[in-house]
Amino acid sequence: MTTVYDTEALWQTIKQEVKGFSEREPALASYFYANILSHDSFASALSFHIATRLGCDSVPEMTLSEVFDAAMRDQPAILEAAVADIHAHYERDPACNYFALPVLYFKGFQAVQSYRFAHWLWQQGRRSLALFLQNRISTTLDVDIHPAAVVGAGIMVDHATGVVIGETASIGDNVSLLHGVTLGGSGTQHNPRHPQVGDGVLISVGAKLLGHIHIGEGAKIAGGSLVVEDVPAHTTVAGVPAKIVGKPSQASPSLDMDHGV
């Protein structure tokens, strides 16, 4: 379970931070105004900013923004998850010393929010547009998340370049992933063929998890590991192929981001 955060309080904090950014860097004043300060809600700002990242000549930003607004009206959990993701970055990443930074600059956060809109479209049966968004996310942000995958809240994808999450993968709440992580498939069957990741898991840089395997709650996957078998809850695995090498120092290693084994 993720903590329930106050969306309006976060929005007011972000606006105050961005006003300060604008005063200190006038060259970006128009950018800050367009993406944050001109909006009357966090939902409006998020919709506009993601649409700006993903829009193109054939599918303009305005069209995507209208779709994203509809998604958040229909499924408020999309916005709640975005708020939880911002807090995840702020609490786990020492480089994130403002709540506004993930929204403005962190492509891991932006890719996950873009996926959430694509996932809503997939659930609505609008699969062509969902797959279009998957392609745009991959092209513009270098993160490839299939819109059918299931991703929880309180997610931090740090740096994010090269992250791949396959069609039948699932990720629980309060999970942290680093760049180069793959949740890949094994086999040609249409049944679940991708990893199922529990709550509070830490997956370190470059780890490859392949096949319909289960990663237990609070597990830690060491950097560069190849995981092809189930990982018990609250254990640390490392190596190629990965083997159990110990236990994390806390119940949810995703929260302290300690990559030691």
Image: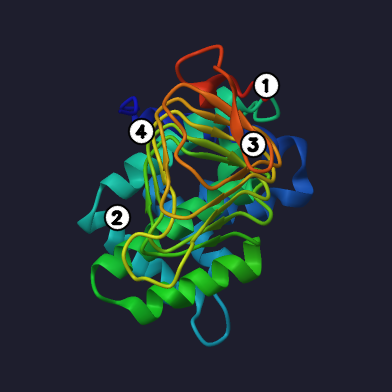
Q: Amino acid at mark 2?
A: Met
| Nearer the camera: disc 4 or disc 3 | 3
Query: How many angstroms separate mark 3 from mark 2 (CA)?
Result: 31 Å
Mark 3 is surrounded, within 10 Å at the Cα level, by few (under 14), some (14 to 19) or many (20 or more) other residues, namely many
Q: Secondary structure at mark 4?
A: helix
The vertical placement of 113 against 100, above or below, is: below
Q: Which mark is residue 204?
A: 3
Helix, strand or loop at mark 2: helix
Mark 1: which secondary structure?
Answer: loop
Which sits earlier in the primary sequence, circle 3 or circle 2?
2
Residue under pointer 4 = 8
Out of 153 and 196, give the one closest to the viewer: 196
**Residue 235 at x, y = what percent?**
50, 23
Q: Is residue 180 visible?
A: yes
Circles 3 and 2: CB atoms closer than 8 Å: no
Spot occupied by residue 249 in the image (x, y as percentages of width and height): 56, 12
Question: What type is the residue that disc 3 sits on?
Answer: Ser
Task: Specify which label sits upstream in the sequence, 4 or 3.
Answer: 4
Identified at 67% across, 57% down, the residue is 162
Residue tagged by mark 1?
Answer: 261
